Image (spheres, rainbow, N blue to C red):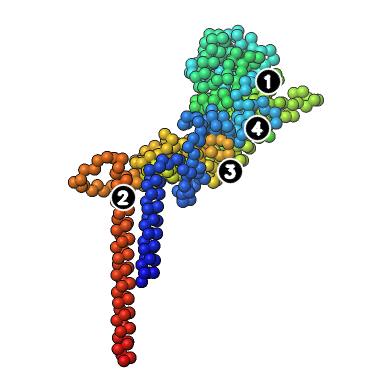
Amino acid sequence: MKKMKCISLLLCMSLLLQALAITGTAAETTGAPVETAGAATLPSEQASAQTQSTQAAEDLPFGTACVQNGCRTIEGMVPLAGSDRKLESAQAAFLYEVDTGTVVYSYNPDVKISPGSLTKLVTGMVVLQHCEMDEIVTITGDVHRRPAGSIHAGLKTDEEISVKDLIHCLLLESANDAAIALAVHVAGNQSSFITLMNQWVTSIGCTNTQFESVHGLDDNSMTSARDMARIMMAANENETMVEILGTLSYTVGATNKNEERSFRTGNYMIDKGNIEDFQDSRVTGGMFSYVQAYGASLVVSMETDPEEDPPGEMQFIGVVLGCTRTFDPNLEWKAIVYGNFNEMTDLMKLGFNNFKVNRIIYDGMTLSQFAVAGGECNAVGQARVDIDSVVPISANMNNLYMTFNITDGGLTAPVKKDDLIATMQIKYLNSVLAEAEVYAMGSVSVAGDNGVTIHGTEVQTGGDGSGVLSVIGTICVIVLGLVAAYLAFNSYMRSRMRARRRKRRADRRRNY
């Protein structure tokens, strides 16, 4: 009997000590500050990208990391395909996907290089800002001051010709006398027109471009591959410019000084009339240049061919500057390697053969879970925006990963539904593809707060002591429960012993 009492007593004491340990641990965990936790793994249908949470993923302000450390917008400094040399001779190159705002590839994108005849793109844009296409221009003697031996349209003093005819001569034939005639017509002289050109490129965000002539045949005009992409983007917003840059041939009607003249574009990417090697149906327009001193350059617009390219429409602007052109030693006029068209062909293959467009973030997409200090559960974050990006063809969402910056360094309960709780970056290799804000999918209450208020008559005082009283009350309840259990167990054991004694007595009586 005594042995059973001792065992019962030891069992009760063990349970009591265990309960005290659990209560103390729970109180410590609830009151401690919670640091930013790693993202919990969500079901695959909710989180299709590999996630990774961090307290300070980047020091850059929100919205700038995808530019400074990524490929977002034309300003992106870390191209998706890197910046190593991929073309044989181009001094600079740039490949930009317009619809998603992704810099796919760049090489020396901000190095200043002579634009050569690409200057005429800007000449044409300024003319279209100041003139109507049916305006008549009277040619002055200025046109004869063009660079010696340069391409011209054969304009004559006092010839009357329309702006439409001149701008086709400018962009299809790359005629330098047409550039001078238009500049004088718009601004009175070339110097004033050059001022308008420089003002315009500054207005569209060019930072490395400065023109010293209206045609580009000088030693001082400078641009960069990134700026030429900006210029081409602006040109693509002008319907007249888009039409002219995609024109294969044009005929200037007879004037008071000249007979009818016909011109054919020198952009072999859109025309196979002379050279069939470079024509590609995906090229919609562009401008070319070759000056022996500066090399061969080209800027074009390209778009996906649904019959040949991977799913997903893409619209590229490609730029190559300062490519090497080589000629047949026996026929100095015959090019063996054109340079700009060869390099652009390779740049086009890089873009269309290796990349696709994917939606990497969609509105309502579950992103990750975030620990909430003092909360009853983690907060689940979701995106509120659709974001598309160019990604490698071989990539899937598991190749992308996310990092998070928690709002104000941490989350504390309560958190309300739709609260901004974090910002997110989504990356591929070393390039930040995009950034997005993260919002709470649902509310997170304070731990133990079930939303039910119990009204009592007793007034509690001393906020610091309430926690201690709660722990003491919990211990008392546990002790009383254990004592009651012990008494019940002891009573049960006594009754069993009495029953056994009665049985033994009855057995002895029967035996006698």
Mark closer to the observer (1, 3): 3
Determine the CA span between mark 1 and mark 2: 87 Å
Mark closer to the observer (4, 1): 4
Q: Residue 259: percent from the left, percent from the top?
A: 61, 17
Residue at (53% x, 40% y) in the render: 357
- Label 1 CA crowd tier, 10 Å (few <14, some 14–19, many 20+): some
Residue at (55% x, 24% y) in the render: 231
Mark closer to the observer (3, 4): 4
Mark closer to the observer (2, 3): 2
Q: Which residue was labeled with disc 3?
A: 393
**In the foreground, 429 or 186:** 429
Q: Amino acid at mark 1?
A: Tyr
Question: How many numbered discs sit on the rendered protein?
Answer: 4
Of the numbered discs 4 and 1, the one sitting upstream in the chain is 4
Could you say whether the residue bearing mark 1 is in a helix, strand or loop?
Answer: loop
Q: Which mark is residue 84?
A: 4
Determine the CA span between mark 2 and mark 4: 69 Å
Is any part of residue 204 visible from this angle? yes
Mark closer to the observer (1, 2): 2
